[in-house]
Amino acid sequence: MQGCLGALDGTYIDVRVKAEDRARHRTRKGSIAVNVLSVCDRDMRFIYVLVGWEGSAADSRVLRDAITRPTGLKIPRGNYYLVYGRYSNGEGFLSPYRGVCYHLKE
């Protein structure tokens, strides 16, 4: 896969926060968590991790923050990262086609 730098995805990590902060950290499934974006290179080594967004933050918002930070995630022109289906295709990001089942047993 020419130009593929690796893959990225987000995950939630459960946390304990003050009662007044729980609403911001509540995920769509109801747990109290932070949203973490992690990026691996093609050798499965972590090369970038962004921690700290509250659980209610959308994945696209966290990714936008990562690529707009001065020391954030950089994607050389003509290259891309594979992303999970929650992310949309765009310059530097390639997500699977919606509605296509991958990894089917033959």
Image (cartoon, grey):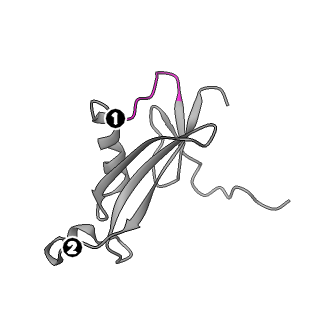
Q: Which amino acid does label 2 sit on?
A: Ala
**Up-down: is 24 above or below 88?**
below
Q: In which quarter of the image is residue 14?
A: bottom left
Crowding around mark 1 (Cα neighbors within 10 Å: few <14, some 14 to 19, many 20+) is: some
**Up-down: is 71 above or below 19?**
above
Residue 106 point in image, percent of width and height: 86, 59
Instruction: Name the residue beneath numbered marker 2.
Output: 23
Residue at position x 34%, y 70% in the image = 27
Residue at position x 46%, y 21% in the image = 77
Residue at position x 60%, y 58% in the image = 99
**Magenta residues, start to end:** 72-79
Is residue 74 a member of the stretch shown in magenta?
yes
- Outermost residue toward the top in this view: 77
Residue situated in front as seen by the camera: 42 or 65: 42
Residue situated in front as seen by the camera: 84 or 50: 50
Residue 80 point in image, percent of width and height: 52, 32
Dot 1 lies on which element? Answer: loop
Q: What residue type is labelled 1?
A: Gly
Q: Distance between the residues labelled 2 and 1?
A: 27 Å
Q: Which numbered disc flags the more N-terminal residue, 2 or 1?
A: 2
Judged left or right of residue 43, residue 91 is left
Instruction: Name the residue beneath numbered marker 1.
Output: 72
